[in-house]
Image: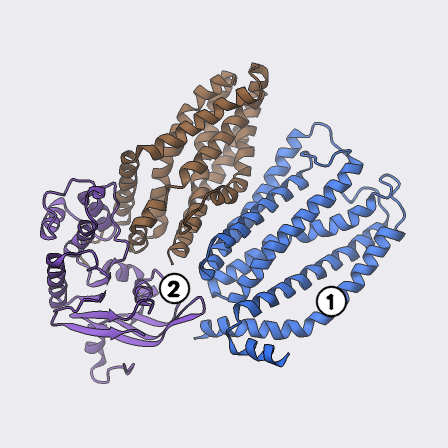
Amino acid sequence: MSSAAPTTSPNSDTDKIMLAARELFCARDERVLFKNLNFDLPQGQVLQVQGSNGSGKTTLMRILCGLNDSYEGSIKWYGQEIEDQAASFFSSLLYIGHRVGVSKVLTPVENLRWSCSLKQAVSDEQIMDALKEVGLRGFEESPCYTLSAGQQQRVSLARLIISPASLWVLDEPFTTLDTKGVAMLEKIMQRQAQAGGAVMVTTHHSLSIAELTILSLG
Amino acid sequence: MWVWFSKLGSPKWFYELSGKWLPWLIAAMVIFMTIGLVWGLVFLPPDYQQGFTSRILIVHVAVAGTSLAFFPLMLVAGTVTLVWRMKLADMVAKHAAILGAWFSFITLATGSLWGSVMWGTWWEWTDSRLVSMLFQLFLLLGVISLRSALEDSETAAKACALLSIVGCINVVIIKYSVEWWNTLHQVASPVSLDPTSPNGPQFWIATLIMIVAVYLFLSVSLILSTRNEILERERRSQWVQDLVLKN
Amino acid sequence: MTEKQTTTSAAFFATLKRDLLIAFKKKNDIVNPFMFFIIVVSLFPIGISPESDRLTEIAAGVIWISVLLASMLSMDNLYRSDYEDGSLEQLLLSPHPLFFLVLAKNISHWLVSGLPVVLVSPLLAYMLALPSEAYGTLVLSLLLGTPIMSLLGSIAVALTVGLGSRGLILAVITLPMSVPILIFGTLAVQSTLNSQSPIGYISLMLVMLSVSVSLAPLASAAALKISVN
């Protein structure tokens, strides 16, 4: 991929690029995971990160979120360093990792109340509607340890529906979902892209989303 | 990126530079150590109050003084690790913790050896210096055990750096609070360990030489172990392999 | 992006409320350290002497050391389940200063683990034959000392949260750090017993508490970032 900056009308073009990564390099305990990695994530796009096991997909996702800082290179958010606008970046970011961030002793509603209110104010109606949409109607008040892994995954996916975040970073969100769940998530991701947001996702599924581009690692 | 440059560049630079310094440092160490030990342990006249026991003090005071330098050293190394991500600082910090624990232990050992003669007991809680040295040893052992527990070297580096900074602040608070605690619990004050008690200027000069010798010993051992660490961590880099082939 | 972002105080209280809710749902985490505290204190008279004179002498120290051990035991669940289920990552990705979120977690932890111990301490002081005029000082010193323990312990827990088997490393790191609190806490009680004013020690502990409140959450936050890396 070329790292050339857009030449014509730079302002309007760079405005649309949400996330730009340049010359990313990451080594973990002397093993180089990736180097010279460049990519842009414009608004309205779903970027699927592919690569074999151990190629650094999860590490890349965590680096983009700022959870991992052992890398070299630059990551820019709307053309500026992330550190200079951390509050704006983090309120626009929604990350779901391998560990989905759902406490097992709490109910789905209690979980969402907390994890959403870390970013924006949320009403109980919004939470109920979102849970209904991810197919958890009737489980709103059951403790999450009574739910299956797929259902817990759905609890965390409900955050996608509630949150106004413009950038989603999803690490293997499909693993525990059934076919219906996969179709639902694809639909939500497509909706996000069409609304001008952007999604970065790692998965081995072949996604049926129009706005898809693919980034291959190692 | 200069960050990456400093990460890769420094260990090699340090290895080469320290290689040039090392012979001089070792020579100086041997000279000071010989003068200090021979004079202090063989020729120094016995103290009128403490007799020949005062000779232990020369070693004890020198080692004790040096072991106070470890936490400040680790504070600096830890800050460099966290702020500039310099790997070299972490290598120094790793061995500083281990050496510091040994120095603290030797301080305690020589201190109680001296105490066994002067106070008639190997351990004396009323001496605040021994007590705070004991807790410094515990804190250093905590840093060492944290490093050995953490597998990922980068996480270990940063975690130990943070703990060293917290520990350094803490060791100062411990020192003062133990001193305070001590003044209130002083039931029967034993003979003071304070080296200002009547000792001739000879004693002071011998101690001073010994302090310099021990600091040199500290630098030499720290440099040697850091060089080992560099070779081990950078074993896959080109310059280390060239070095091995050359020898 | 600009949509009704929460204020930091809302995020602070949401975190506080959540942690309290979890604590009340996992009652074992509250009850066990508390029981441990009471049992350890009850072992001392059996191991040392049932004579009230000797008990009076050691009462403050015994209670203080048992408090330190109990708080050590309860520290473990401060970040562990959050780390394991991924909630910690969500916490780190909040746009709000991590300082306040960590502080909220520490406060909630102290409310469920430190405060009950402080409240029950007069009863144990009575059982250890501590003269009643020292109860006030004991409670006050514990009230100031236990939050310091929670704040300091939080740093060590945050540093070791990624370890599979932590075992005693937490105690090895934290207990030496608690020496100053132990000294001032017991000296305060002792000075009341000698009919002197404990105000000096109490104010020193107050200073230590304010310094810990303002610095320790920063260190905990940095430690969490390191561990989650």
Which amino acid type is marked by label 2? Asp
Callout 1 and callout 2 share a chain: no
Which amino acid type is marked by label 1? Ile
- Can I make out residue C195 in this image? no
User: Mark 1, chain letter?
Assistant: B
**In x, y percent, where is residue C147?**
43, 37
Residue in view at x 19 percent, y 60 percent: A174
Which tint is chain B?
A: blue
- Can I make out residue C88 in this image? yes
Mark 2 and mark 1 in contact (Cβ < 8 Å)?
no
Residue marked by disc 2: A69
Residue in view at x 54 percent, y 31 percent: C200
**In x, y percent, where is residue B208?**
78, 55
Q: Is residue B209 left or right of residue A121?
A: right
Q: Is residue C154 left or right of residue A118?
A: right
Chain letter, colour purple: A
**In x, y percent, where is residue C112?**
35, 33
Q: Is residue C7 above or below residue A171?
A: above
